[in-house]
Amino acid sequence: MARFAHIADVHLGAFRDGRLRELNLQAFERAMDECAKRDLDFVIIAGDLFDINIPDLAVVERAVRKMRQLGKPIYAVYGSHDYSPTQTSVIDVLHEAGVLQKVSSGVYHDIEENGQKKQKLRLDVITDPKTGVKITGISARKLGLEKTYFQDLDAAALESLPGPKIFVFHCAIQEHKPENLQRVDAVPLSLFPNGFDYYAGGHVHARLLTDGPSGNSINGNGKANIGKITYPGPLSAADFRDLEENATLPHGFYVVELGVDGAVAEFVPIPMAKIQLVRIVADGVTAVQANGKVQAACLEAPSGDVALLHARGMLSEGKSSDINWTTARQTLEQKCPIIYVNNALETKERQSVRIDAEKPDAIAEHVFRETLADRDLPAELKGDAGVKLGLDLLAALREENPGDNKKRWDEMVAAKAEKILGIDH
């Protein structure tokens, strides 16, 4: 028998607003306290403990303090956010410091299959010293490249291991993708190894607890024997969508009992904040009418810790910039100290932008050119000059952080944007 926590998608260091970052960090600290109360054998973190591979050191220090206070083994894989191809991730630092243990290492070796030699990835397997549970897994890679590792996996070697055993991963499963992630890259269940009692997933920001298939083979290696497949969803929140969901559906983690009859999981909610959701639907109304809806909704909003103002719809006349967002924000600030605005209002002018190119750069240029064509803009923002400015800014924003401190990287990107715009301090 083993009792463990399954946590995923913590995203420590997410959000530009320091107050939201603090709420996110406090939620993780509460989760560690909850794990301590339940006297678990170990904790599994299925990726994205941090929102970036080299996060703010103040965030790391507090997270490490809580993990050390727990005094239990913590087994983790990289997520798509805290992954680094050069092993410069804070996850590697914490592994070397003994704060947690990575469970996604392995080596390629030659095997003979159907008379042919092939290279297969043989994963290292860790045995928890107290419970004897075997733990292994595959970390995430950027752009969904972890699918290659699943394809190369020496599944037979893992399937031959005696149980109990846990497989940890950070990717979507093709057969279990939520509706809002249908376009996201995913790994088919047929590439997962059979015979594990518990499949601890991360990456999908939606809760899932289901029994895997049994009976017919899913990968040609005999009968399928897939245990519990689980995604706990985000521990707290990492973006507006997470916050919006958290307003009505509590986030948290699973506590799992692994015994002779399989895995039994209990969801443990972790409160993040009192979130007030202010929704405005403005389909088919003018910008003036939409402004009235926005201001009225803000006046009626109850008090809380965080207010989420979400306006959506297609305006029949005017632009979303005609709405007095400043007044709306000021009204909400009297009731909630943290305000997050998601302006998803559209205009017919925006809807009429047509894209007939296939390459991303050509699409971007086409969108900029058509969007700027009929607008009353200064000369330096019209025609080729405006398109070039937009493309230069887009290129600066697209640059991937090579592993720098998040705050410092944000400052570097802002400095590049100011240089492109010709802003002098």
Image (cartoon, helix red, strand yellow):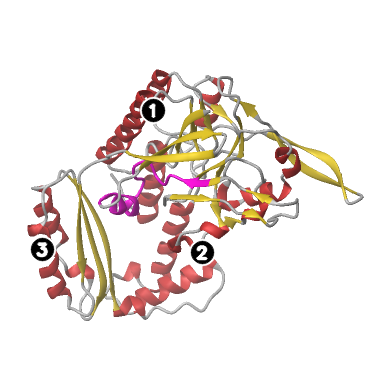
Tell me the quadrant of the picture where the C terminus can be found: top left
Q: With respect to residue 422, does 182 lie above or below?
A: below
- Mark 1 or mark 2, which is nearer the start of the sequence? 1
> Would you name the residue on which mark 3 appears?
295
Q: From which residue to which does the magenta span run?
A: 229-247
From the viewer's perspective, tell me whether residue 356 is left or right of residue 30.
Answer: right
> What is the x, y in percent for residue 3?
47, 29
What is the three-letter code of the residue carrying label 2? Arg
The answer to which of 118 and 314 lies nearer the viewer is 118
> What is the three-letter code of the residue carrying label 1?
Cys
Most extreme residue toward the front is 261
Q: Which residue is mark 2?
A: 183
**Quarter of the figure with residue 305:** top left
The residue tagged with tag 2: helix, strand or loop?
A: loop
CA–CA distance between discs 2 and 3? 36 Å
Left or right relative to 336: residue 180: right
Left or right: where does residue 149 sit relative to residue 386? right
- Expressed as whole percent of the image width and height from the top left, the position of residue 124 reads 68, 31
Q: Residue furthest right?
A: 115
- Mark identifier at residue 35: 1
Which quadrant of the figure has residue 78? Answer: top right
Q: Amino acid at mark 3?
A: Gln
